[in-house]
Image (spheres, helix red, strand yellow):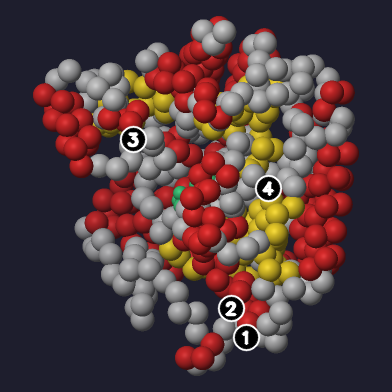
Amino acid sequence: MNDETRRAIERDQRHLWHPFTPIDGWLDPDFEPVMIASGDGATLTDTEGRTYLDGNSSIWTNLHGHKHPAINAAVEAQLGRIAHSSSLGLGNPAAAELAEKLAGLMPPEEGPFRVFLSDDGSTAIECALKIAWQYFQQNGQEQRTEFVTLSGGYHGDTIGAMSLGKSGSFHAPFQPLMFPTHEAPAPDCVRGPGWRENPPRTPAHRSDHAGAVAEQALARLEALFESLDTRAAALVLEPKVMGPGGMMMQPEGYLRAAAAIARRHGALVILDEVMTGFGRTGRMLAQQHEGVTADLTALAKGLTGGYLPLGATLIRERLFDGFRGGLERTFFHGHSYCGNQLGCAAALANLHLFETEPVRERVAALADNLREASQVFWNLEHTADVRQEGAILAVELVADAQTREPFPAKRRLAYQICERARHEGLLTRGLGATLFLLPPFCTTPEQVRQMVQVLEKAARETLSGLA
Ligand SMILES: *Cc1c(COP(=O)(O)O)cnc(C)c1O
């Protein structure tokens, strides 16, 4: 280990607190943390000079690769002017242009949209939640105070976002701090009715029984809204792919029908596209797959191409209009860095790439490569599902494929497999016993094959060592 690495690890272990990281494991003297020094395209290099494939796009943020010349140039040009000025009572051209571009992602026939800029995914959700609440409070529907969510959903780690996506494993200690919400079951095609008829090597959410699973989940959702009468403020969900909770994928038609149920009951539709946004599922926004237009859409992760923290909430103009007036109708909400110019410049450069390069075709080709390579995962005796939407791949492993009995969470199987994979040059993370690959769009076919090969080998070796 060289001096730079040693010093970085010493400082880190002495002073840093890492997110979502069990402390004893991180501080274990036998554990050697990776210190990232640089990145290029789909690769990351550590302070020891070892290069890794970035199999999860640096936690799903990076789209076009690291050190992208166009985004680098845009950020550098913005730095030459100003890095940040406040959006409280002041405007700036970068934020204004970004708002126009983001509003333009929504279908024109749905009417104009507004943009509220914030810092990350949690703040984009928090903003949507508070707008929905205050809108009803001051527009004659004070009784609309209830939020409907899906089980297994995740929307971030601030208190409001946690309340909407109560993750048992992440958020249990905070239960008393969260406000009550109503949870409808998500369509679980891996374990839902009819899973035993799942034909071999077919992703559960695309097999014949998926329709029945969706129908059952929708019936529960309908009953829930029915029971809330006119008290429902909004349905909040991740469209098409429920990411952090385990990359659960929804059957075709589920999103459209769920949104229709909420609308029929006068509730708003809030879609969390923090992970699915910006081409990851094959369309610019995942809601476009089913012709749904959310009243409020939360965006973050890929917004800046994975460069800078920035969140955005897209808001139907009708809701904005409900805040017109003076002090008494104002949305008193915001952050010091709202409208940050550097973040906006990176986001504009990211969006510009979608206009000037064949990004959609690139994602389609990447998705094809992933699909082809990932078939090998079906050969593992513990595989319950190999599923994919666009450039999102998930492999769900279970203790017993015949009964779908899960591996105990404390085994941290995905973690163990990913640890093994990192020693072979692949960086990615999973959840429980589900493995994820979400490579940057610039990943070459050869790099995709390598990612899959390393992950499959790591899974096979880890599983065979279990007994
Ligand atoms: C990552 C994520 C969030 C939270 O975003 P942060 O930027 O981590 O606050 C919310 N929802 C989904 C679907 C996410 O993937």
Helix, strand or loop status at disc 3: helix
Mark 4 to mark 2 CA distance (whole Å): 25 Å
Circle nearer the N terminus (4, 2): 2
From the Cβ of disc 4, is ligand 1 less than 8 Å away? no
Dot 2 surroundings within 10 Å: few (below 14), some, or many (20 or more)? many
Question: Residue at left 17%, top 31%?
Answer: 10
Label 1, on which residue? 138
Question: Residue at left 69%, top 44%?
Answer: 240
Percent across and percent down for residue 17 are: 29, 43
319 in relation to 359, above or below: below
**Does 354 sit left or right of 253 as displayed?**
left
Say if mark 2 contacts mark 1, CB within 8 Å. yes
Circle nearer the N terminus (3, 2): 3
Mark 2 to mark 1 CA distance (whole Å): 6 Å
Instruction: Check the picture and name the quadrant holding the C terminus.
Output: top right
Helix, strand or loop status at disc 1: loop
Q: Label 3 is placed on what type of residue?
A: Ile
Q: Label 2 is placed on what type of residue?
A: Gln
Q: Label 1 is placed on what type of residue?
A: Gln
Circle nearer the N terminus (1, 4): 1
107 in relation to 8, above or below: below
Helix, strand or loop status at disc 4: loop
Percent across and percent down for residue 360 are: 59, 39
Percent across and percent down for residue 462 are: 51, 12
Label 4, on which residue? 151
Circle nearer the N terminus (4, 3): 3
From the Cβ of disc 2, is ligand 1 less than 8 Å away? no
Label 2, on which residue? 134
Q: Label 4 is placed on what type of residue?
A: Ser
Question: Residue at left 80%, top 60%?
Answer: 224
Label 3, on which residue? 23
Helix, strand or loop status at disc 2: helix
